[in-house]
Amino acid sequence: MANLKPPVARAEMLIRRPASQIYQAFVDPAQTSKFWFTRGSGPLTPGAWVTWHWDMYAAVAEVEVVALEQDRRIAIRWPTPVEWLIAPRGEAAALVTITASGFKGTDNEQVAQAIDSMGGFSLVLAGCKAWLEHKVQLNLVADHNPDHHVKSPPDRSLHTKT
C-alpha cells in the first residue's frame, strides 16, 4: 500500500433531534449509556480524562477530551483521535459524522482497525438515533458480540453444603 494515505474511519447518520440534544447525548454519560457504553466516570468537559466501561465485555477505555464546541463538535483521544461533527439540518435534525484516524500497525492492521471503527461507530449512531428519536434502547453494542460477554461468577448461595 505504498504511497496511500493512512485509513480513516467515518460513519454518518441523520438524527431527527436538535443539535443540542445530540451533543448532550454524547457528552453526558447518563445518556450515552443508553446506547453505547454501560457507564462513564463523568461528563465530557474540556481537558478532562474520563473512563468508559462496557461491563458486558469487561472493557474499559481511558478517554482524553481534546476539544468541545457546544452543539457542534467533540474531539477526543481514545487512544487515537476521534471527532464528532454535528451539522444542523434545520432546527429539528442534524447530520452527525464521527471520524476516527491515527491507526497504528502494519498497513493491513490499520485498515482492519479502520473497518472495525467504522462498523462500531455506525452501531453507536444507530443506537443514538433510536434512543433520541424513539426512547428505544436497541442494545446494539452488547448484542453485536454476545459470545464475548463476560460470565458472572456462579451464585454460591445455590451450592452451599448442608
Image: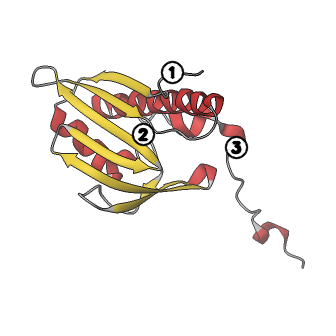
Residue pushed farthest left? Answer: 91
Residue pushed farthest right? Answer: 162
Residue 128 in percent (x, y) is at 36, 34
Mark 1 Cα-neighbour bin, 10 Å: few <14, some 14–19, many ≥20: few
Question: Mark 3 and mark 1 in contact (Cβ < 8 Å)?
Answer: no
Total tally of numbered discs in the picture: 3
Q: Mark 3 = which residue? A: 148
Residue 31 in percent (x, y) is at 33, 47
Residue 151 in percent (x, y) is at 72, 54
Mark 2 Cα-neighbour bin, 10 Å: few <14, some 14–19, many ≥20: many
Q: Amino acid at mark 3?
A: His
Query: In front of the other: label 1 or label 2?
Result: 1
Q: Residue at x 14, y 24 (%)?
A: 92
Q: Mark 2 = which residue? A: 35
Q: Mark 1 = which residue? A: 4
Q: Quadrant of residue 40?
A: bottom left
Question: Left or right of 8: which side holds 46?
Answer: left
Vertical comparison of 68 with 119: above or below: below
Residue 27 marker: none
Residue 107 in percent (x, y) is at 61, 29
Secondary element at image label 1: loop
